[in-house]
Amino acid sequence: MRRKREVIEGQIYRKLSPSGGYWEVVAIRKDGMGTQHAQMKRTDDPKTLKTLSVSTLLDPQQFEIVTE
């Protein structure tokens, strides 16, 4: 059985791609369908924001957590 991880504000994730960078979770929100999304800012450029589903963030082929 796989342990379910929780995404919370302040965590930092690394995008697993050549130009992925490090991203900090700044907010967690639910859409109208109940899907959770994480609003993130790039750690080396805080004006660069992205929002993606928590399930995408927890995909080990796309992101890895750097800080809990």
Image (cartoon, helix red, strand yellow):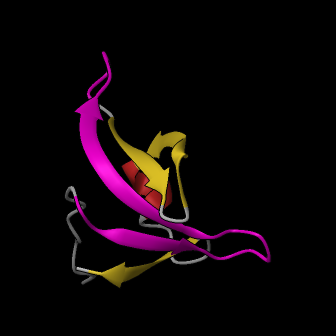
Image coordinates for residue 63, horizontal then vertical, percent:
53, 72
- 29 on left or right of 48: left
Q: Is residue 8 above or below residue 22?
A: above
Find out whether residue 23 is within the magenta segment.
Answer: yes
Vertical order, 29 against 57 (above or below)? above
* Quadrant (top left, top right, bottom left, bottom right) of the C terminus: bottom left
Closer to the camera, 34 or 40? 40
Left/right of residue 55 with respect to residue 7 in the rendered view:
right
Nearer the observer, 2 or 60: 60
> From the image, which quarter does the N terminus lie in?
bottom left
**The magenta stretch spans residue 15:** yes
Residue 41 percent across, percent down from the top left: 46, 50
* Residue in the image at 44% along x and 71% along y: 13
**Image: magenta residue range:** 10-34
Please say if 58 is above or below 37: below
Residue at image point 23% right, 71% down: 5
Residue shown at the point (25%, 61%) measured from the top left: 7
Residue with the most extreme top position: 32
Q: What is the x, y in percent for residue 27?
A: 26, 42
Query: Residue at the spot x=68%, y=68% of the render?
Result: 20
Residue 11 to residue 64: above or below = above
Task: Tell how many labels.
Answer: 0
> Which residue sits furthest right?
18
Residue 46 left/right relative to 27 = right
